[in-house]
Image (spheres, rainbow, N blue to C red):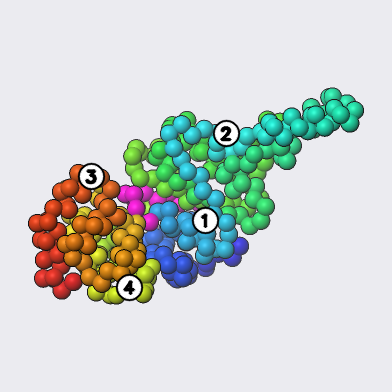
Amino acid sequence: MRRPESVGAVIAGLQAHHYLAGPALGTAVFLSLKLERPLLLEGEPGVGKTALAQALAQMLHVPLIRLQCYEGIDRESALYEWNYPRQLLHIRLRELSGEDPQFTEQSLYREEFLLKRPLYEAIRPEGDPPVLLIDEIDRSDDEFEAFLLEVLSEFQISIPEIGTLKATQRPVVILTSNRTRDVHDALKRRCLYQWLDYPSYAREREILRERMPQMDPSLSTQIVHFVQNLRQRPLEKVPGLSETLDWAAALEALGVLALSEQVVEQTLGCVLKYRDDIMSMGAPQVVSQILGEIAAGGG
């Protein structure tokens, strides 16, 4: 796997896969690759944390392995499990062939009888070391985080029946957190850190045009103005960049050429995902006010 040799090369490589990274994020990614350190990305949902890992895997031409964290995730779900049905079939076939029972039992514990989960696949890949995305680490519990800390420290796994398996080459590791809880300091010390915020107006417009170059520039400007306006309001869930892109794709699919009160009313569910937010922001007077501000600002 050939890795970029400069921050500029990282930024250009990500942009080639439609991800626009600023100098700070480009530097964090470059250092993560150069120093072989995990990169922890924190920020609100929908600001591009997961998308960065996807673009990075494409840039490096390696697989993306995703471990989605959730409440109650355990070691076995992330690492490996024994394939019991296959082991039982193996025993039965050996018995039918007259094999020594003791030999049969010993032969059950080999890698071929493992169900390999994301961490195992990342540490023992069949080809180039992948990009390992540990998504929403803040949703897991303290016990799993402690286990993950051990894995990321040595990049090795211990299987009692087989022994210790160590990565010959370290995977590229991206962790994401939506800050539903604080990630422990011990894990943060193992990582480089980068905060991803909502994009500025100029950056969001640039991203939208990069992702949807065929869209009329006037409409993309109106979309970004509208979403930026929504982010300044007291909403239960502020729309992220992913909602901006979803809304733009929906408007394009509908053949919309310009925002109007009717269009916004019919498609607001692409941007806002809570009923109370839709009820408050979808009121005709609110939509009219926002559209008026966009028109006055030249959108």
Q: Position of residue 161 (x, y in %)?
A: 71, 31
In percent of the image, x 59 and y 48: which residue is there? Answer: 122
**Residue, disc 4:** 215
In the rendered view, would you say 172 is above or below 293?
A: above
User: Mark 2 and mark 4: span between their CA atoms?
Assistant: 46 Å
**Residue, disc 3:** 275
Contact (CB < 8 A) between labels 1 and 4?
Answer: no
In the rendered view, would you say 113 is above or below 221?
A: above
Mark sitting earlier along the chain (1/3): 1
Q: Position of residue 143 (x, y in %)?
A: 47, 30
User: Mark 3 and mark 4: span between their CA atoms?
Assistant: 29 Å
In the picture, the quarter occupied by the N terminus is: bottom right
In percent of the image, x 86 and y 29: which residue is there? Answer: 96
**Residue, disc 1:** 35
User: Mark 3 and mark 2: span between their CA atoms?
Assistant: 38 Å
- How many labels sit on residues? 4
Check disc 4 and report its element: helix, strand or loop. Answer: loop
User: Mark 1 and mark 4: span between their CA atoms?
Assistant: 40 Å
Which labelled disc corresponds to residue 76? 2
Mark sitting earlier along the chain (1/4): 1
Camera-side mark, 1 or 4:
4
Q: Position of residue 236 (x, y in %)?
A: 22, 44
In the picture, the quarter occupied by the C terminus is: bottom left
In percent of the image, x 46 and y 40: which residue is there? Answer: 69
Q: Is residue 42 magenta?
A: yes
